[in-house]
Image (cartoon, helix red, strand yellow):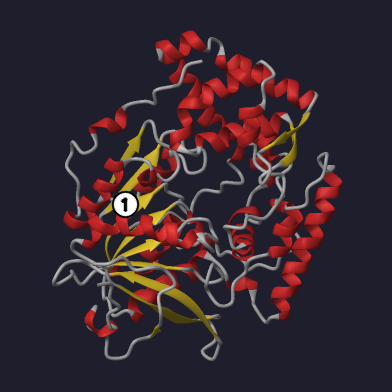
Amino acid sequence: MAAVMAVGTLWSLPAAAEARFTPGPCWFTVPDGEAALCGTVAVPERRDRPNSRSLRLPVAVLLSTARQPAPDPVLFLEGGPGASPFGSGEATEERMEVWWELSAPFRRTRNMILFDPRGVGRSEPDTDCPELDAVGATRGTKPLTREQRMAAERAAVGACAARLEAAGLDTTQFSTPVAAEDALDIVTALGAQRVNLFAVSYGTRVGLEILRRQGGRVRTAVFDSVYPPDVNAQEETAWLAQRAYRRLFDDCAANRTCRSAFPDLEKRFLGLVERLDRNPVDLVAGDHETRRVLRLTGGAAIAAGLEAMAVSEAVPAVPIMIDRAARGQYAALAEWAPTNWLGDPEIADGLAFSVECRESVNTADPLKRADTARRHSPYGLVAVDDPGQRVCRVWPTGHQEPAERLPVASPVPALLLSGAYDPVTPPEWGDRAAATLPRSRHLVFRAASHIVTSSEDCAMAAAVTFVEQESVPATVCPGAAKPPLFEGP
């Protein structure tokens, strides 16, 4: 029978907890034979003001199946920024079914903690911008001009910022350091002295900040798709795109089947980009419910390939997608082309804007951006219509201290996981983080992309082993070195 247990049975609570946990009903189904503790943790909106109002963060502890669980739980740190580990709406039940299965190996010995960060999902208050979702849902018979889109975005962003301000929410209080303190407050409120971190994508930056601030409370850390604080993705956009395509073209050329089926793949792709940059193609993508009108430019073609390469399972089909597009068959490429609109129903837009403006867009060096685009032409086209700078000119955000951009040095045992095809957080960034983590091990999966544990069973098994033993065997995941098997025509 599914059960909900009292907090006192989890870990011994400290004499005077710095944060408060309030038990409550779970917002998802707990399977028979499993148990969960659900509730909220109150954190201060402003950590520099003792009497600041509290924000309530939803917390779910998926309880261990062990009779006596280890005292150090696993704390999951979601990516984004602005994503919820629980999903939203009807997707929550499906997402939680996956979580029960994925967490089972961890929960053989210890509890797993999931939570919505401040401003995200079920947190109170949330920072979603439905104004942007409404604008993006507008459908017409032809794409809007760039000027029309910018005007609609500006109005929606301004309306969202004004609404949050009227509600008394201080959007300058969303940052990676604050996210790290919130996560530690949750651990404290649940009575755990130490914790094991399992972080993905942007969550790894939060995890690294936890190591910087209170590394003594961390027993082990698993960082999947590493985003270290001393890199600026805005400055590296063109390089990130170029290195992903370089990986693809080199692997195809080294594979007899791919090389034979798609000769001169790189040359044909660059020709496609040049052609679409001169003469964009307007077309309709999606079915009746997801139908959208888009303008396929050279930059959009590059972005579409990157979107596909960000999904491990889609990588083998990218060469044939490029081949067909080069022949004027754009349907497959168009399906991956990202929307020109800001806003994502699965992301808390306000939180995302606050963090990205504070820590990436506003701190990016324009000269470095331009130089990177020049050195990696034509891949800089992917950022030509980047709305980040437009948003950050009007979105209220905090100021990042220079010390936050320093590498994190820590003796905590850390397992770093990277996918060779990752266009978002490449393996080079994992190497960069590992340089100041002396007890780290970095595994690179040649056929994988962003968030390796979502596609590679061995990566998840290695993460479980690492949490248990604080190390993995030298021969772990021998299949990680195998490149992808590309699809033929």
From the viewer's perspective, tell me whether residue 181 is left or right of residue 89: left
User: Where, by quadrant of the figure, is residue 407 drawn?
Assistant: bottom left
Is residue 352 shown above or below 183? above
Q: Which of the two residues, 366 or 305, is positioned nearer the viewer here?
A: 305
Q: Do we see residue 347 in this rendering? A: yes
Q: Amino acid at mark 1?
A: Leu
Residue at image position (69%, 80%) is: 167
From the viewer's perspective, tell me whether residue 141 is left or right of residue 286: right
Residue at the outermost left position: 67
In percent of width and height, residue 414 lies at 29, 53
In percent of width and height, residue 24 lies at 40, 82
User: Where, by quadrant of the figure, is residue 162 drawn?
Assistant: bottom right
From the viewer's perspective, tell me whether residue 338 is left or right of residue 283: left
Q: Do we see residue 411 in this rendering? A: no
Residue at image position (72%, 49%) is: 341
In percent of width and height, residue 384 lies at 73, 39
In percent of width and height, residue 58 lies at 45, 74
Is residue 31 shown above or below 257? below
User: Where, by quadrant of the figure, is residue 166 drawn?
Assistant: bottom right
Residue at image position (55%, 61%) is: 82
Helix or strand or loop: what does disc 1 sit on? loop
Q: Which of the two residues, 12 or 37, is positioned nearer the viewer here?
A: 37
Residue at image position (61%, 46%) is: 234
Circle 1 residue: 437
